[in-house]
Image: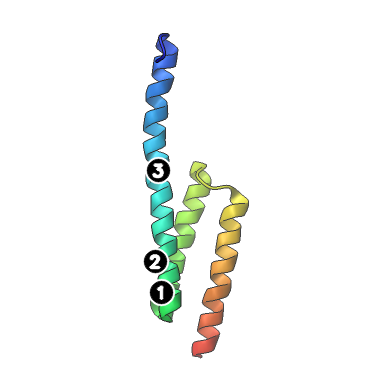
Amino acid sequence: MANHVSSLKRARQTVTRTEVNRSNRSRIRTSLRTLREALVKGDVKVAQEQYRATVSALDKSVQKGILHDNTASRYKSRLNARLKALVTAKA
């Protein structure tokens, strides 16, 4: 265990940041899972609403440094393609 005051503080900060990051990452994964389930069920209205919420969560995660910008863009692109395919199939 750390002995210096500064290293003890860093250890405390690491624990706090780990909890925050874990919570944010969990929120993103839950949102992604919910959207994917809506896409599989074929529910267009729910999928569109969930897509907006998921994109918002992804953008916030990029701002907070949880995800890399390109990773979030890749997720959004692939999910939007699936959503678009669902909407055109139902129309």
Q: Is residue 78 visible?
A: yes
Which kind of residue does numbered mark 2 sit on? Thr
Which kind of residue does numbered mark 3 sit on? Arg
Residue 25's spot in the image, x, y percent? Answer: 43, 48
Identify the residue at the far bottom of this view: 91
Q: Return the residue at label 3.
A: 22
Residue located 51% across and 53% down the image: 59
Relative to 68, does residue 1 appear above or below in the rendering? above
Residue located 41% across and 71% down the image: 37
Q: Secondary structure at mark 2?
A: helix
Crowding near pointer 1: few (<14 within 10 Å), some, many (20+)?
Answer: many
Relative to 60, does residue 2 appear above or below in the rendering? above
Crowding near pointer 2: few (<14 within 10 Å), some, many (20+)?
Answer: some
Residue 72's spot in the image, x, y percent? Answer: 56, 55
Q: CA distance from mark 2 to mark 1?
A: 6 Å
Residue 42's spot in the image, x, y percent? Answer: 43, 81
Question: In the visual, does 14 lie left or right of 85?
Answer: left
Which kind of residue does numbered mark 1 sit on? Ala
Q: For this rendering, which residue is in front, 10 or 53?
A: 10
Dividing the picture into quadrants, the one containing residue 74 is bottom right
| Quarter of the rendering occupied by the N terminus | top left
Residue 69's tag is none
Q: CA distance from mark 3 to mark 2?
A: 18 Å
Q: CA distance from mark 1 to mark 3?
A: 24 Å
Q: Which of the two discs, 3 and 2, labels the residue nearer the N terminus?
A: 3
